[in-house]
Amino acid sequence: MKQSKLIKLVRKAIGRHKAPLYTTADSNNGNMDFLKITKVENVTLEKGQVITIGTLHLTTHQIIFRHADRKGELWVPYPIIHTVERRLCTTDSKLWPLTIRCRDFKTYSFFIQLEQDSMDVFDTIQKLTCIESIKYVYAFDYKPEKEFSSSDGWSIYNVFQEYGRMGVGIPTSSWRFSSVNQDYTFCETYPHTLVVPAKISDNVLNHASKFRSKNRIPVLSYLHWQNKASITRSSQPMVGLKKNRSIQDEKLIEAIFQSNDPTLPPGLQSVFGSTQTNLIVDARPTANAIANAAIGAGSENMENYKNCDRKFMGIDNIHVMRESLTKLTADAQCLPIKKQNLDRSNWLKHIATLLESSLIIIKNVHIASSHVLIHCSDGWDRTAQLTSISILCLDPYYRTFRGFQVLVEKEWVSFGHKFTERSGHLSDEKYFINSVNTNAANTAFNTVQSKFYNQPHVREISPVFQQFLDCVFQLLTQFPTRFEFNEKFLIELHYHCYSCQFGTFLCNSEKERMDYEVTTKTYSVWDYFNSNKNDFLNPLFDGGAEDKEDMGNNEGFTARIRWKSDSPISRTNSPGINDADTLKEGLQTISFKPVNYDDNPDIDPWKNK
């Protein structure tokens, strides 16, 4: 697996659609009171090995550095700033250094001539970064210089259209739309419209919700386009040490698992069993699930759930992932990533675990026609990772440019991934180190940083969505002809997760976005991407191969699996879906290692049947 280019190549911040240095919005914004200084000339910028002289401008929403020759600019929005350190004057050049580390892995060092100016710049950045409410971020003031040609970003995901595409709502469907959460009183972190089994009433849902953490009951994420096997998602059950149970929760899951009537080919029955065995996926390590039982939660007691198995995927929690990213970017100048940091961080190990877990889900749904229920603790981090990666692989629509936007809106935005908390949109003054006043100039920066991660205000920050984008990058690398979008799209999507320039990734839930009137007061990030679509299209994309008729038989999935073989896969010796012995061998040797298609284009497993 390659070192993630999502980390390695995040070098081009968004340069277009910039506002003037000072706008009407700036003058009307209360943040103007924090501008102790707005302009510093003859500032030296050090970025990597490049040194530039220019003028530093501070506005209410971003830092702007203009090169002296006026041939270039650097824009740094305040929300993307991770830490700022003001250090002692350099002994040789007598300049006052200010080092800014950003969440998109960039580091900038500004050298300022006057001590007072460096103090004012430090204080101004601190006040404008450490805001008290999401309503003060740039998105609520941002106006593009030229209106976007696309303007349907806020309506790109329609719950009725998207689930209707899967067959929900038709008379023969086993699923129905429920408005039990239309006012968000049923579950504050779920979307207003839920998809549940048709035979389950809202009254049963209300009782079942008491048994799930944060009332996040099992609801539909995806319905397979052929066999109607489902992927559902929820939070952990409130089992506790007393092994509590809920008859309503058991009925709900039973109805989910009975929503289709699959018939496996004879050759597969020896692999998956003669009857359908559904799967409950607990994304956590087993020990974590057991520990949660001590606080009244835990994992399902399988004696109470019929005809299903449970698997723990061993995906670590947000704190482990945050520490992994910290180790990965331990050096002040962290691009490119050093191999020893990559090895020590276990970053790729975590990415591999996510992909391997998703593959288990994919096999059960696509080949075994089995239902899969996925949850972690609260169901908005690891659960979102597994549902979205699995669905991305199962349905070609989500690998199109527009379909991927729908996927992110559905699985991440509407289902309550906590973007504000996980991305650290509201910073804290503890991220600002004034080594001049604290006499800590010789303290190692990463030691200070490690201390911050033990503070309560940062314990909710974690690169969960970033890991998802990295997984998508790995799949894009492995299957370059099966994605309509390119790597640049993923890089800029990662940037805007932190920039707060658009409203799409603001707040922690659909309800919060409604309370802050995000959809009426900000622009959607999808308007930006769709207005510049040509910049983000993959020239290798083979749209014709995504035709479901080509994948109408189960061999469509075998084309995505690399089989153990002494020679490259060819059309003549690829295993048939009913060849049980070959299938067993193939399932044991699935690999996510990238393939060099230039050396042998005939072994592209997506084209090969």
Image (spheres, rainbow, N blue to C red):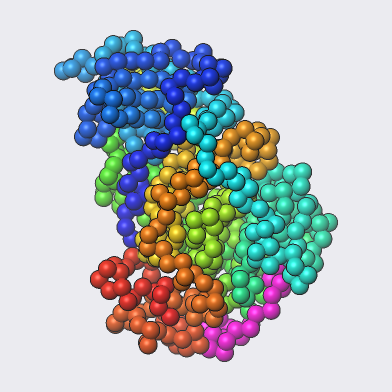
Q: Which residue lies furthest to the left in this view?
A: 92
Q: Where is residue 22 in the image (x, y as percent from the top left)?
A: 46, 19
Q: Which quarter of the picture shows residue 253?
A: bottom right
Left of 281 or right of it: where is 340?
left
Q: Position of residue 229 (x, y in %)?
A: 63, 71
Q: Position of residue 339 (x, y in %)?
A: 26, 50
Please check the rendered image and state whether residue 263 is part of the magenta-colored stretch, yes or no.
Answer: yes
Q: How many labels does the image show?
A: 0
Q: Is residue 247 visible?
A: no
Q: Is residue 438 above or below residue 541?
A: above
Between 329 and 140, the residue placed more toward the observer is 140
The N terminus - image quarter = bottom left
Q: In this view, does 521 lie above or below 540?
A: above
Between 281 and 8, the residue placed more toward the observer is 8
The residue segment tinted magenta is 256-275
Q: Which residue is drawn at 21% across and 18% down?
A: 90
The C terminus - image quarter = bottom left
Q: Residue at x 37, y 87 (%)?
A: 573
Q: Residue at x 70, y 57 (%)?
A: 160
Q: Which quarter of the picture shows residue 372?
A: bottom right
Q: Which quarter of the picture shows residue 25?
A: top right
Left of 204 or right of it: where is 332?
left
Q: Residue at x 53, y 80 (%)?
A: 554
Between 301 and 499, the residue placed more toward the observer is 499
Please check the rendered image and state whether residue 360 is part of the magenta-colored stretch, yes or no.
Answer: no
Q: Is residue 224 visible?
A: yes
Q: Where is residue 338 in the image (x, y as percent from the top left)?
A: 26, 46
Q: Is residue 276 above or below residue 197?
A: below
